[in-house]
Image (spheres, helix red, strand yellow):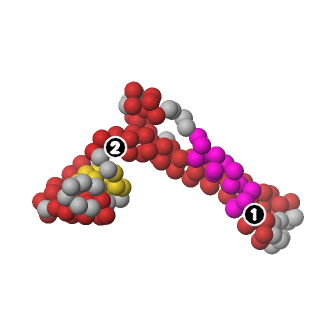
């Protein structure tokens, strides 16, 4: 079992890429934990692999769904939400800087604590929840055109 984990570690070291390991039994636990993404399959050999993994699936055929559909959506939503959070902070910081410049850089805040709390939690919550409903490409098209995944590899 440790040889499988050693293979995963060597692949990580020599290729400098992220790794995924898929296993279905207790002998795959070390390999699953050595990988960046561990996928456990609930099977005849028990649940040790699925309990030690990051993601648990019932059948090997669900791996394509996990990578191509859920992985794509997760990556895109994470990228959009991080940009949204950065821009949300920039908007409120720019307004504070402009206010300070107009009033000769006096140490007065334009926003109260409750407004900042409301801004970060409630006023800007609608776009975050709208991301859950956003579906750029249908599930069928993702499986028909796996080259769409190449767009995500650019890191944008």
Residue 98, image quadrant: bottom right
Q: Is residue 18 visible?
A: no
**Is 142 situated left or right of 20 in this image?**
right
Q: Main secondary structure of the magenta part?
A: helix
Q: Residue furthest right?
A: 103
Can you give x and y, in whole percent of width and height, for residue 81 in the image?
Answer: 58, 51
Residue at image coords 36%, 55%: 55
Q: Does the CB distance between marks 2 and 1 fall below 8 Å?
A: no
Q: Is residue 81 visible?
A: yes
Residue bearing mark 1? 118
Can you give x and y, in whole percent of width and height, for residue 45 in the image?
Answer: 19, 58
Residue at image coords 39%, 31%: 143
Q: Magenta segment: does it hold 82?
A: no
- Foreground of the two, 91 or 7: 7
Q: Residue furthest front?
A: 44
Tell which tag, 2 or 1, sits nearer the viewer: 2
Residue at image coords 40%, 35%: 149
Q: Earlier in the sequence, mark 2 or mark 1?
A: 2
Residue at image coords 48%, 48%: 74
Residue range highlighted in magenta: 120-134
Q: Magenta segment: does it hold 131?
A: yes
Q: On screen, 125 above or below 141?
A: below
Can you give x and y, in whole percent of width and height, for residue 145 in the image?
Answer: 40, 27
Mark 2 element type: helix
Residue bearing mark 2? 62
Distance in Å between CA atoms under marks 2 and 1: 41 Å
């Amino acid at each position: 079992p440790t040889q499988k984990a050693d293979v995963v570690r060597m692949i990580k070291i020599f290729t400098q890429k992220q790794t995924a390991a898929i296993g279905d039994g207790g002998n795959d636990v070390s390999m699953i934990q050595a990988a960046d993404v561990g996928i456990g399959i609930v099977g005849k050999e028990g649940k040790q692999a699925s309990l030690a993994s990051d993601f648990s699936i019932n059948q090997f055929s669900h791996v394509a769904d996990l990578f191509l559909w859920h992985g794509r959506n997760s990556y895109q939503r994470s990228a959009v939400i991080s940009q949204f959070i950065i821009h949300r902070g920039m908007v409120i910081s720019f307004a504070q800087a402009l206010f300070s410049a107009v009033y000769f850089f006096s140490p007065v805040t334009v926003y109260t604590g409750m407004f900042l709390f409301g801004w970060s939690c409630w006023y800007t919550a609608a776009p975050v929840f709208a991301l859950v409903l956003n579906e750029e490409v249908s599930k069928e098209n993702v499986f028909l055109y796996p080259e769409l995944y190449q767009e995500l590899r650019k890191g944008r």
